Image (cartoon, rainbow, N blue to C red):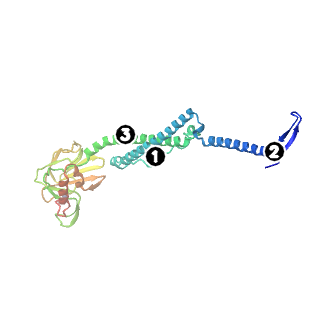
């Protein structure tokens, strides 16, 4: 307890107690600290943007913003699904459709080419959520471009498909004589023993045994380029050009039913089986040419045979027996 001091007050003509200066100091300090604390808390509240100071309007705006952010997240998820579906379509486009119609696949870079040069997202910059909005816009832009390219690709394929129908009609895809039980397949394409010399020799076609006069049919749409006896070994023979690099040849005929220059459809009767030229017995020697090379005709009967029949034919055709030439 400090000493109590007095002083004479001339106004009241009495002695009065002198208040200790220290306590006033403490009081001032307390006020100062309290004030600082209040201002500090206020400052902190503003910095942290805690809702204690927000007006109802601000609160509702904040809720709206949160809702937008959530919706953006959901849109992003949906875009992800779209991207997956598109990627799947592009994959099929490149690896099935374009391949099937012999068109070059569209390279990945072209499908997803960036948007270089001008910054087209400048107007979206400078906001709290700019990153989110630019990201979403960019993804949508890329999806849009992918769709345009995909759509163009399908247009192209539609055109090719129309052409392909012509091609499919042209390919020599059926057997050239009626061969229901496949019993007429005598010798296939491959190494066979020569009927005359008995030496092993490449046999470039398929032989079908048949009595003289059996009808022979065109195996695909095309134009008869030759029907004559001027090719060594084949005897009386017919050649049909089908276009797209395909040609079919029918040898050892007894009689023609068409002339050079005539157009034929698949299945048209073109001639009759015989044994002219280098032939051991009446039979049809049949060849398929692609781009100037002879290829195995058995690969073209898929259209007219069941799986089982094809299997059987394959068995007959691959037996290494003697050809009839
Ligand atoms: Zn032959």
Q: Which residue is mark 3?
A: 155
Residue 252 shown left or right of residue 135 in the figure: left
Out of 141 and 159, give the one closest to the viewer.
Answer: 141
**Residue at image coords 72%, 44%:** 30
Residue 174 rendering spot, x and y as whole percentages: 20, 49
Residue 255 rendering spot, x and y as whole percentages: 14, 49
The image's mark for residue 21 is 2
SS for callout 3: helix
- Mark 3 and mark 2: span between their CA atoms? 97 Å
- Mark 1 and mark 2: span between their CA atoms? 86 Å
Residue 277 visible in rendering: no
- Count up the numbered dots: 3
Residue 42 visible in rendering: yes
SS for callout 2: helix
From the viewer's perspective, is the residue at label 1 or at label 2 nearer? 2
Q: Are marks 3 and 1 in contact (CB under 8 Å)?
A: no
Looking at the image, the residue that sits furthest to the bottom is 199
The image's mark for residue 8 is none
SS for callout 1: helix
**Residue at image coords 18%, 55%:** 308
Residue 84 rendering spot, x and y as whole percentages: 40, 46
Out of 312 and 239, give the one closest to the viewer.
Answer: 312
Tag 3: Cα neighbours inside 10 Å, few (<14), some, or many (≥20)? few
Q: Which residue is mark 1?
A: 110
- Mark 3 and mark 1: span between their CA atoms? 17 Å
Residue 193 shown left or right of residue 34 in the figure: left
Out of 9 and 52, give the one closest to the viewer.
Answer: 9
Q: Quadrant of the C terminus?
A: bottom left
């Amino acid at each position: 307890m400090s000493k109590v001091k007095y002083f004479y007050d001339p106004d009241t003509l009495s002695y009065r107690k002198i208040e200790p200066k220290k306590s006033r100091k403490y009081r001032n300090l307390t006020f100062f600290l309290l004030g600082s604390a209040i201002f500090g808390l206020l400052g902190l509240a503003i910095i942290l943007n805690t809702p204690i100071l927000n007006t109802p309007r601000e609160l509702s705006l904040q809720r709206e913003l949160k809702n937008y952010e959530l919706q953006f997240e959901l849109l992003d998820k949906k875009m992800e699904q779209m991207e997956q579906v598109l990627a799947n379509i592009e994959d099929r486009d490149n690896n099935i459709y374009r391949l099937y119609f012999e068109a070059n696949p569209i390279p990945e870079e072209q499908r997803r080419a960036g948007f270089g040069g001008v910054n087209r997202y400048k107007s979206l910059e400078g906001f709290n959520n700019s990153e989110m909005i630019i990201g979403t816009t960019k993804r949508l832009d890329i999806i849009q471009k992918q769709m345009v390219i995909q759509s163009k690709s399908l247009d192209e394929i539609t055109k090719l498909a129309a052409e392909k129908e012509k091609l499919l009609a042209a390919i020599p895809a059926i057997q050239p004589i009626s061969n229901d039980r496949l019993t007429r397949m005598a010798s296939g394409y491959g190494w066979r023993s020569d009927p005359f010399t008995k030496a092993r020799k490449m046999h470039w076609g398929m032989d079908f045994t048949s009595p003289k006069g059996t009808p022979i049919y065109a195996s695909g749409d095309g134009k008869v380029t030759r029907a004559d006896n001027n090719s060594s070994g084949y005897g009386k023979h017919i050649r049909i050009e089908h276009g797209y690099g395909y040609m079919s040849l029918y040898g050892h005929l007894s009689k023609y039913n068409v002339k050079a220059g005539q157009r034929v459809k698949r299945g048209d009767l073109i001639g009759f089986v015989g044994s002219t030229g280098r032939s051991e017995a009446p039979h049809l020697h049949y060849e398929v040419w692609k781009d100037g090379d002879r290829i195995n005709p058995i690969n073209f009967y898929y259209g007219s045979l069941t799986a089982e029949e094809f299997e059987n034919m394959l068995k007959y055709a691959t037996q290494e027996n003697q050809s009839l030439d």
